[in-house]
Amino acid sequence: MTLLLKNGRLVDPSQDIDGPMDILIRNGKVARIARSLPSPGGKKKADNGTTVLDMKGLVVVPGLIDMHVHLREPGFEYKETIRTGCEAAVAGGFTAVACMANTDPVNDNRSVTEFILRKAAACGKARVYPVASITRNLEGKILSEFWDLKEAGAAAFSDDGRPVTNGTVMRRALEYAHSLDMPVLSHSEDPTLSAGGMMNEGLVSTELGLRGIPAAAEEAMIARDVLL
């Protein structure tokens, strides 16, 4: 199948492109990109096996990457599976996703990482990057086996929505991850400041009589991690 996208605004940072471009796609792969490509027979409709789509007013971008998803497998398949999550991602224009470690069991060992990658490969939809936990069982106490997880295919480390409150543990995590050239995705929140909070602290929280979460709850943890 041949597809010609006409008159769209192409945004592709990898090629330093941001402007009007036509794109010719053959058998699912980009064959040519140019400011203006001729339509088959000069027509703006399907002709000789080529489908022409007018993208005027629309933005065309490479597949997007979602850096924080919950594929819920293993352990919570009643909420989501790797297959349904990847199908939803592709339907929304996301061709790659980074899945968090809050599964059951937690992705804190190579067996879970390898399981996720096998299921994703069998699905054949979006590319899946497993994010392994910083600490075992997301408890914030003992570091996961970083080297083993990287070898298994983990793309980063994160305790998902749980902050690593122990400064010594976080410092060691950052040092170890740095030695492996692996990113750490930190949940920036000081739970002693946000405890019981239901919304941003301010006039509205006061008017509603709801306990607010001060901006300092996030800022304090960011400052700590930057210093570490």
Image: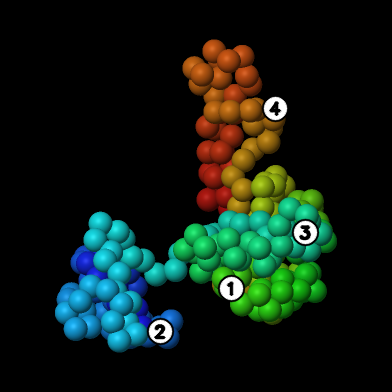
Residue tagged 2 = 1
- First along the sequence among labels 1 and 2: 2
- First along the sequence among labels 1 and 3: 3
Task: Determine contact: label 3, label 2, CB under 8 Å.
Answer: no
Separation of residues labelled 4 and 1 (CA atoms): 39 Å
Q: Label 3: how many residues lie within 10 Å, few (<14), some (14-19) or many (20+)? A: few
- Front label number (4 vs 1): 1
Give me the residue at 57% from left, 71% from top. 126
Q: What residue type is labelled 1?
A: Lys
Q: Which amino acid does label 2 sit on?
A: Met
Residue 196 shows which numbered tag?
4
Separation of residues labelled 3 and 2 (CA atoms): 36 Å
- Front label number (2 vs 4): 2
Q: Position of residue 25 (x, y in %)?
A: 35, 81
Residue 150, above or below 193: below
Residue tagged 1 = 125
Residue 77 shows which numbered tag?
3
- Front label number (1 vs 2): 2
Separation of residues labelled 1 and 3 (CA atoms): 18 Å
